[in-house]
Image (tube, rainbow, N blue to C red):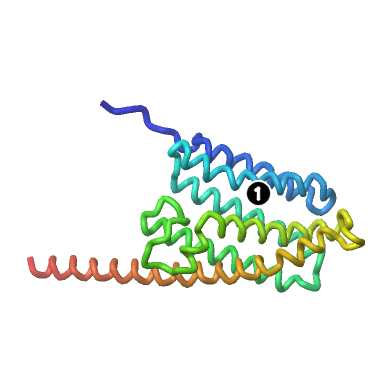
Amino acid sequence: MLTETENIFLFIPNLIGYARIILAIISFWFMPTDYVIAGWCYIISVFLDCLDGHAARHFNQCTKFGAVLDQLTDRCGTMCLLVTLSYFYPKYMFLFQLSMAIDISCHWIYTHTSLLQGKTSHKFVDANESAIMRLYYTKKVLFTMCVGNELFYAALYLLYFTPGPLILGFSTFKLIAIVSAPVAVVKTFISLVHCRVAVQNLGIIDTNERLEAKQVDLAKKAE
């Protein structure tokens, strides 16, 4: 007996994703003028990112749409923050542009390739793939990398408006930026690893598809 078709767009993790988008848009609007509203909306959006994956697994609602929605929200949120930082710190605009280009391109090709491979999530790493990727997608490492990266850019954003609470006369936000900077650099390197792994997997997909096409042509000629 056929059951009612599920509406994957109303799955709980995807509803969380929509809330993240709304919060991100509010944050973008206030970024140039009100760091309090922008900061809180951005932070809550990032916090919800930690919940949607748990919700997907808990309710057995993992979907390709949810994986793509999560990736796009993450990438667009960070990119728009970097656009604002380029405006606030024009001296470092090239570095922010480079960070955006690497982040968007590497994660896009990796997510797209994962979908072509039939994976329900880009976080599933095959045993024969990069050891760096397998380590990166362990829960603790992934959480540390993502939080550290967001803290670095968020601290730079907040520093433009205020030094924050002072500890022995030293800016808290500046301290956070200094401590989290190495994490942001390492995460950029890992993004490049994403790209390398994706390119290799795309090469395998292309090779197999071309081989199958040749076999079909040979079979037709043999008929």
Along the viewing direction, whichever of 184 and 92 lies nearer the viewer: 184
Report how many numbered discs are placed on residues in the image: 1
Q: Position of residue 104 (x, y in %)?
A: 58, 63
Which residue is painted at 55% across and 66% down in the image? 105
Residue most extreme to the left: 223
Which residue is painted at 76% across and 67% down in the image? 178
Q: Quadrant of the N terminus?
A: top left
Which residue is painted at 61% across and 61% down in the image? 145
Question: Image quarter for residue 167?
Answer: bottom right
Q: Position of residue 199 (x, y in %)?
A: 44, 71
**Viewed as shown, does residue 210 lie left or right of 90?**
left
Q: Position of residue 9 (x, y in %)?
A: 49, 37
Along the viewing direction, whichever of 37 and 180 lies nearer the viewer: 180
Instruction: Name the amino acid type tagged 1.
Output: Val
**Viewed as shown, does residue 180 lie left or right of 68?**
right
**Viewed as shown, does residue 157 lie left or right of 105?**
right
Under circle 1, the secondary element is helix
Q: Position of residue 94 (x, y in %)?
A: 72, 73
Work out whether 30 lies above or below 3.
Answer: below
Q: Residues within 10 Å of mark 1 (few under 14, many from 20)?
A: many
Identify the residue under disc 1.
46
Along the viewing direction, whichever of 92 and 53 lies nearer the viewer: 53
Q: Quadrant of the C terminus?
A: bottom left
Question: Image quarter for residue 91?
Answer: bottom right
Residue most extreme to the right: 169
Residue most extreme to the front: 168
